[in-house]
Image (cartoon, rainbow, N blue to C red):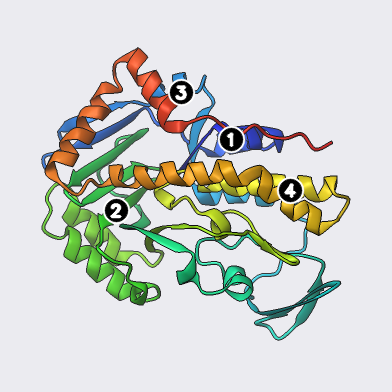
Amino acid sequence: MIDIWGTGYNLLERFALLKTARERGYVFDRLTFVDERGREIAGFGGDVFRRAMSGRFFSIPRGDLARTIYDAIDGDVEMLYGVTIRSLREDISGVDVVLSSGETRRFDLVIGADGLRSRVRELAFGSESTFERFLGYYAASFVAADYPHREEATYVSRGLPGRQISRYAMREGRTAFLLVFAEARARPELAHDVAAQKSLLHETFGGDRWESPEILARLDGTDDLYFDAVSQIRMPNWSRGRVALIGDAAYSPSLLAGAGSAFAMLGAYVLAGELHAAEGDHIRALAAYENRLRAYLNQQQKAAAGLAGSFAPKTSSGLAIRNAVLNLMNIPMLGRWMTARMLGEPFVLPDYH
């Protein structure tokens, strides 16, 4: 689940996708933290965010946002499925792309929009380890059907030092779970080992109370587990020749920042606009794309790095402070001020006529 506000909201509105996205989205009425018996110890109403954003705030599963965008371009853009990029070879007039299917295609530009683990970035710019900044946490998420504990329109979390489990009800009887925990070092050996990922989650959360045993039992039955490090991507340049990167591939703020999809859409909007303004002069357009966004996204990444720790404070005192801050959100004027500070100012979108 991702939240849509500010820049992301404005972009969907400009793309004429806002109505569809809102229909597929959710409006949460409460965020609550509970103790081992399920009693609330901290929380606030979702109207705090909506008032601060003048109602321009909702949540949507990332896949439903992707489907909304896909539906808008289906039939207008060629789609290739089940293939990856093996190699890139650039010359003065274009880029030859060798696909895993064995086919070679030639393009004027290659734009890597392929996320935190970008294959395009690896081929064109170098090793992932050069650019990844691990923030000291891992996150896992999955969806289960017919989970017996449901509070509609409520985001429920149980936090302990260094770890947190959250759940929220979705349509069609589904429940989504998010598990976040502190880890001293990145563990790339876990990347494709689902059994090891599940084992680590059992090791981390297995001794906890509340609903942890039931949630871990549902974890064992899932065949669609998201599991990854909470990381940022920091790069000195987002383009090289005829290859450029947008979104998490270039400037991931980390999944816990809640703004990665908005930044990806922003990057796509500005890059497309600058290519249009430059009448196809990719050198001028790629430089303008980076010049417009670099300072803003650097600032957003810095803020996001500090936010990661609030999801799973590593000490009991950190948890107590986090809970106290959440309860202060219930004071109307203070809640609006804190929300505005936390969410920040949206990026002022340039107009490309």
Q: What kind of element bears circle 4?
A: helix
At numbered mark 3, what does the secondary structure look like: helix, strand or loop? Answer: helix
| Secondary structure type for disc 1 | helix
Q: Quadrant of residue 258?
A: top left
Of the numbered discs 2 and 4, the one sitting upstream in the chain is 2
- Residue 262 can be seen, yes or no: no
Q: Residue furthest right?
A: 279
Q: Position of residue 229 (x, y in %)?
A: 37, 62
Residue 165 x, y percent position in the rendering:
25, 49
Query: Circle 2 sits on which residue?
Result: 180
Q: Nearer the viewer, mark 1 or mark 4?
A: 4
- State whether residue 190 appears in this view: yes
- Packing grade of label 3 (10 A; few <14, some 14-19, many >=20) is some
Quickly name the residue at label 3. 50
- The type of residue carrying mark 2 is Val
Whether pointer 2 and pointer 3 mark residues with C-beta atoms closer than 8 Å, the reply is: no
Q: Which residue is mark 1?
A: 7
- Give, as a three-letter code, the residue at label 4: Ala
For the residues marked 2 and 4, what is the alpha-carbon distance in whole angstroms? 37 Å
Image: 91 above or below 253: below
Circle 4 residues within 10 Å: few <14, some 14–19, many ≥20: some
